[in-house]
Image (tube, rainbow, N blue to C red):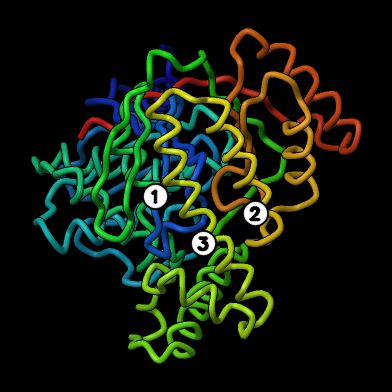
Amino acid sequence: MDLKCEEKFYAIYHRMPDGVTFCPYRISPLGAHIDHQWGKINGLAIDRGIHIAYGAKQNGVIEMESLDFPKRAQFHVRSIEPERVGDWADYLRGAALGLSELYPLRTGLSGVIEGSLPIGGLSSSAAVTISFLSALCRVNGITLEPQEMIRLAKAAENNYVGVQTGILDQSCEILGRKDHLLYMDCRDGSFRLIPTNPKMKPYKIAIIFSGLDRALKNSAYNLRVDECRAAAYDLLAFAGLPYDKLNQTHLRDVPVEVYETYKERLPAQFRKRAEHFFTEYKRAEEGAFAWERGDLDAYGRLVFESGYSSIHNYECGCPELIRLYEILRETEGVYGARFSGAGFKGCCMALIDPLRAEEIGARVRDLYLKDFPALADKYEFHVCESADGAQL
């Protein structure tokens, strides 16, 4: 595979890189928007992702360039800005700062970042963070266990960048295995890798980019997290149950019976967020069983239901993404589809019949661009497969 990041590295530094790290992107067919509420999720790593060509810098300087962004990032491993700067490199600064608090960092890093798909909806930020941490660990002789890498990458987003994600993204990208569905409980991190049942119909993963860019820190992502917490707080109070501080309260703390008893007392938007949580939690459980028995039709129906709830209960999406979802739902050969990622812009994912991939791609493109012709130059349709997670 020819990598542009290696060519760019050589052009800048006039030598070959010391190595190349890779972290895959991920999809979450079920369990969307509930990992931050300690729900359960289904996830798959895919065979596209983030590569970083890197070389050690003995002076401790970190110098990173992205093929997707114009500004080069530069900082020192022992003098990282304690608060975010506000650019794409905040993920790198946050990750390096978190690593430096656990291990002494002496060696810096020069590198070039390359993504194999457009940004938006596949957790490219987590993939960049993990790939970067992998390179920084290698040049400093540090070995991280998978759970340690997950915690560090999540902390960079939560504490430094300021996006209140759960562990879904990092877990799928690290723990995922080819031809296995990751089934994880986000409360305690326990998980199973469910192999694809030999009886299951063949499938591929379609990634359909709306043509719109997405940035979590500028979306309503954190607002939705707060609404979920407020719903949980209210429900526990209505039932006379103990509760903690608001930022430490989760809908997983609320028994479903309590929700059913008191849901009509919630403000409408809080009730919708809670409805999405409890129904999505159940879909994630049912989906794991459907995957285990090889029932792709049943699994796909759950994915479509998840997409519907994301629109009507979680109230994310935009006209472009909603139209993509509707087209996919009406297209033969699509087993299931929904928004991917936070769902405010970005892309949709679909599980499709590989024998009809070309036909599906042509139909979706024609119908979508009929409604949004101005996005013709940015719209993209890709067919992918499941893959192994990042090799630490």
Question: Can residue 141 be seen from the camera position used here?
Answer: yes
- What residue did someone put label 2 on? 309
What residue is rendered at 23% in x and 49% in y? 190
Question: Can residue 50 be seen from the camera position used here?
Answer: no
* Alpha-carbon span between mark 1 and mark 3: 15 Å
Q: Label 2 sits on what residue type?
A: Ser
Q: Residues within 10 Å of mark 2 (few under 14, many from 20)?
A: many
Residue 272 pos. (x, y %): 64, 68
Which structural element holds mark 2?
helix
In the rendered image, the vertical position of residue 124 relative to residue 154, given as above or below: above
Which of the marked residues, 2 or 3, is nearer the chain's N terminus? 3
In the rendered image, the vertical position of residue 286 relative to residue 205, given as above or below: below
Say whether residue 33 is left or right of residue 386: right
What residue is rendered at 16% in x and 64% in y? 101
Residue 9 vs residue 126, the one in the foreground: 126
Q: Label 3 sits on what residue type?
A: Phe
Which structural element holds mark 1?
helix
Observer-side mark, 1 or 3, equals 3
* Alpha-carbon span between mark 1 and mark 2: 19 Å
Which structural element holds mark 3?
helix
Observer-side mark, 1 or 2, equals 2
Which of the marked residues, 1 or 3, is nearer the chain's N terminus? 1
Q: Label 1 sits on what residue type?
A: Leu
- What residue did someone put label 1 on? 168
Number of the label disc, if any, that sits on residue 253: none
In the rendered image, the vertical position of residue 141 relative to residue 350, given as above or below: below
Write down the quadrant of residue 176 in the picture.
Answer: top left
- What residue did someone put label 3 on? 277
Q: Residues within 10 Å of mark 1 (few under 14, many from 20)?
A: many
